[in-house]
Amino acid sequence: MSQILVRGQRHLPLLAASRHLTTSSRVRSEAAKAEGTFRGLGAYVRSAKETPEPVKTSISGEVPKWIDGSLYRNGPGLFEIGNDKYNHIFDGLSLLHRFNIKDGQVTYQSRFLRSDHYNKNMEANRIVCTEFGTLGHPDPCHSLFQRVSARFKARKSTDNCNVNVMSIKDEMYAMTESPFIWRIDPKTLESVEKVDITEFLAVNMATAHPHYTKDGTHYNMGSSFGKVSKYNIVKIDPADAGKPFLQKSSIMCSIPARGRDPSYYHSFGMTDNYFVYVEQPLHFNVMKIMKATFLGNTFSDCMEYRPENKVRFHVVNSRTGEIHSTEYTADAFMCFHHVNAYEDDGHIVVDLCAFKDNVMDTAFVEKMRRGESTPAMGSQVMRFVLPLTVDKKAGINNLVKLPNTECSARLEEDGSVFCIPERISDAALELPHINYASYNGKPYQYTYGVKGDFSQIYKLDLKNKSYNSWGLEDYLVSEPGFVAAPSAGSEDDGVVLSALISEEPSRKPHLLAILDARDLKEIGRAEINVDMTGSTHGLFIPNI
């Protein structure tokens, strides 16, 4: 049984290994993994060609006719330009994908985002724009004096929006974690307009995982760097037709950072009445960022993991923007993705995918291709319970009063609350996806995700602490997307969609798999006989 260290002592609130069920006879061999024959993620992080016009796919099994919409995916799709190579998975140029599903048929198309960085690199036939982990070459058109002068100028943020897509009103945007987003045509995937968030909000960066409510309101988080850096919660009201959607954006709340150097974050949690922001010990060194251009450093060079710092949970009232007076802490961990958060009898339950160490260095492209690492390996779904009301006389007693949980929390001498998590399962799950439309911010039972080596789709039952899986030999899965059935009778009544990348495309085509969300049995698949590569995040949008 895995163990987590809590203040130098071994804490064992972890559950016994749940039964691992397999719903496919062709799941890649776990024994092969143990013998070290994992071939890496070369197929997932390879350059692909775009397919701008929709192409028909070959259908095996059945594609339910009630599925009427498009699955959009975004991720790095070009890792080499001329003789240059990108170093990190965060660097590859954005490739947008669309799987349009209608009347039991599927078409596929893809197109590179025509960002400024894409166009400049293509024109130079080399990498001239710096990305997260790759330094760009000096502009060959600049004189020696201009090149030297450029070293004393602040580096501009990337507009290579290769992380996710967002739908707001009838518009779609490609997103990354810089202050730029790109509006794209949802039918053709053509790049329409670059939007600079800083024209509307005072933020230096923003997440690519906004939350939204049924009335069309969106919420996101963005950081402001300065002498005292801040984490800002942003509210975006539905804008008037024909006007920029950010015109009604506002900063609801600013959370002061622990120090000058703010933390990195990729997502945040939202319940019916609260936001939950996790300040983790992976920091941006602001002084290094200011000197990065002069010293020839990339953004990744300016990040520092400081495990001596505790994690801090910040709770904010989503109605008033008021920061909860209690400070919640936990031992150091790293997190990319929140699974869900909800309120339960005076507590906030926070589920997230946690790593015990910094995993940024595991996402370098050559390491992934050689099978040395993946950025999802080692992730565990952890549950934290934050008591909203704290008895100051509790002493060393457990402040968590919920049944059926191993989570605990205790009052510290400084008035903060130290939280001890529960590991929900031994499934190493990442890229989580829930029935968002009906269960985000509410008590729920299921989440879907990928195994750390991208060989399988997981379905995790958080109530019964069990999971099952599905996968195909010689294929790498992608983040699963849940689509609810019409008049769904249960939380998991629907399908799971996942784009599968063939490790041997000359022999086996790429796929879009359609799985029954209740048991992960395959319902149907669409065979894609054009070039395709891995993708990071996306969403399903019904046809109107």
Image (cartoon, rainbow, N blue to C red):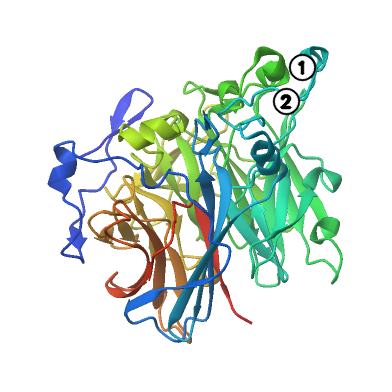
State the residue in front, 167 or 286: 167
**Which circle marks residue 257 in the picture?**
none
252 to 414, vertically: above or below: below
Dot 1: element: helix
Q: How far apart are marks 1 and 2 (CA)?
A: 8 Å
Q: In the picture, residue 245 is in which quadrant?
A: bottom right
Taking the image as drawn, is residue 129 in sight? yes
Residue marked by disc 1? 147
422 to 320, vertically: above or below: above
**Which circle marks residue 139 in the picture?**
2
Query: Percent position (x, y) of residue 111?
Result: 59, 57
Q: The N terminus is located in which quarter?
A: top left
Three-letter code, disc 2: Asp
State the residue in front, 49 or 205: 49
Taking the image as drawn, is residue 441 in sight? no
Query: Percent position (x, y) of residue 214?
Result: 65, 72
State the residue in front, 341 or 285: 285
Query: Percent position (x, y) of residue 296?
Result: 64, 16
Dot 2: element: loop
Three-letter code, disc 1: Arg
| Residue at 43%, 44% in the rendered image | 46
